[in-house]
């Protein structure tokens, strides 16, 4: 159901973005996957509008989360995985650019179906991640050339998902780092933000170049209030890192995300 009046549109966007950003900050995510059903449901945007708007809000959330986590958790912990992170970024940036171009040629109906499938996958990934131990042995052997190839390939997938959903991609980055490269779960959260930042910037610039932000009204009515709410929530979530355990939270949110995605993105078929 869409909001009844335009006056409460911005207020609702601001209020709902705060808990979403808190959860994102706690888990090392941008929270964009939880914004998608809100943008497409109560706020009433089409699938083609949702993606670039979500990317714009994601950029704000990631920047704040990264700054806060940098104060709480030392960024030096990611240095042993710098090679993997760099090639994940390269692959993600390449496909974020390509994916944004593909999205332009998709109808709203096709894009809605793609978003639904990806959100269900992400919801399941969150639930699986909730059961993961603090660290796991790496599935990819510590062979530099092999790790580069795997990181580049995984980056391409992450970039595609990011550009087609308008998400930061942390839901896929974190399990990739843990399973494939044996990164500790807390370090993976910080690393995911470092990887997501350039990925989101590339996708956002590509959508801007394609004219997605010609209409400034959604930026004023939605991106600005959601960005402000995300600023508050990201700071709170970042400060709570290490205090509130996130495993059970991820399992619960994975279930909620799947339910919300099905409810919102199947509405047109009802």
Image (cartoon, rainbow, N blue to C red):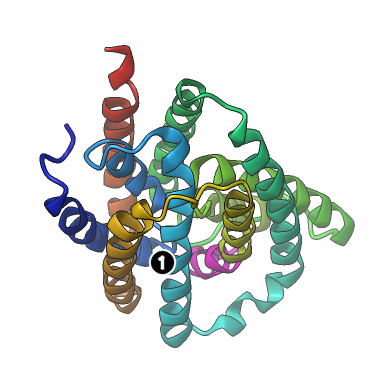
Name the residue: 26% across, 45% down.
252
Is 163 positioned to the left or the right of 251 in the image? Answer: right
Is 49 positioned to the left or the right of 159 in the image? Answer: left
Is 168 positioned to the left or the right of 86 in the image? Answer: left
Pick whichever, 159 or 125, lies toward us. 159
Q: Position of residue 226 (x, y in %)?
A: 30, 60
The C terminus - image quarter? top left
Name the residue: 16% across, 31% down.
1
Q: Which residue bears the numbered disc 1?
A: 61
The kind of secondary structure the magenta stretch mainly shows is helix
- Please rate how many residues cluster around mark 1, counting C-alpha atoms within 10 Å: few if below 14, some from 14 to 19, many from 20: many
Pick whichever, 182 or 18, lies toward us. 18
Name the residue: 36% across, 60% down.
24
Q: Position of residue 174 (x, y in %)?
A: 53, 55
Res. 177 image quadrant: bottom right
> Looking at the image, is 218 positioned above or below residue 237?
above
> Looking at the image, is 236 positioned above or below residue 180?
below
Q: Is residue 245 visible?
A: no
Q: Position of residue 53 (x, y in %)?
A: 43, 51
Is 255 colored magenta in this rendering? no
The residue tagged with tag 1: helix, strand or loop? helix
Please state the extent of the stretch shown in magenta in the rendering: 182-194
Residue lying farthest to the right in this orientation: 145
Res. 261 image quadrant: top left
Name the residue: 53% across, 61% down.
135
Pick whichever, 143 or 250, lies toward us. 250
Residue lying farthest to the top in this orientation: 270
Is 150 positioned to the left or the right of 127 in the image? Answer: right
Q: Position of residue 144 (x, y in %)?
A: 86, 61
> Looking at the image, is 65 positioned above or below residue 134?
below
Is 187 colored magenta in this rendering? yes
């Amino acid at each position: 159901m869409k909001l009844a009046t335009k006056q409460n549109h911005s207020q609702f966007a601001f209020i709902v973005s705060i808990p979403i950003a808190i959860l994102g900050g706690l888990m090392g995510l941008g929270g964009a996957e939880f914004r998608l059903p809100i943008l497409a449901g109560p706020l009433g945007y089409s699938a083609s509008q949702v993606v670039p708007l979500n990317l714009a809000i994601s950029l704000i959330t990631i920047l704040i989360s990264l700054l806060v986590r940098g104060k709480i958790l030392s960024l030096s912990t990611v240095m042993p995985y710098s090679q993997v992170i760099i090639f994940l970024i390269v692959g993600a940036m390449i496909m974020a650019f390509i994916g944004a171009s593909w999205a332009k040629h998709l109808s709203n109906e096709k894009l809605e179906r793609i978003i639904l499938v990806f959100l269900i996958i992400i919801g399941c990934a969150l639930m699986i991640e909730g059961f993961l131990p603090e660290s796991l042995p790496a599935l990819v052997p510590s062979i530099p050339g092999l790790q580069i190839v795997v990181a580049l390939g995984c980056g391409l997938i992450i970039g595609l998902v990011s550009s087609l959903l308008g998400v930061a991609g942390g839901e896929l980055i974190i399990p990739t780092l843990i399973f494939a490269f044996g990164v500790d779960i807390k370090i993976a959260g910080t690393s995911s933000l470092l990887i997501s930042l350039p990925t989101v910037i590339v996708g956002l610039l590509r959508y801007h170049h394609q004219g997605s932000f010609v209409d400034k009204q959604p930026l004023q009515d939605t991106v600005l209030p959601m960005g402000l709410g995300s600023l508050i929530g990201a700071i709170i979530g970042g400060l709570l890192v290490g205090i509130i355990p996130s495993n059970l939270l991820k399992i619960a949110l994975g279930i909620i995300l799947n339910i919300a995605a099905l409810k919102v993105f199947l509405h047109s078929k009802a």
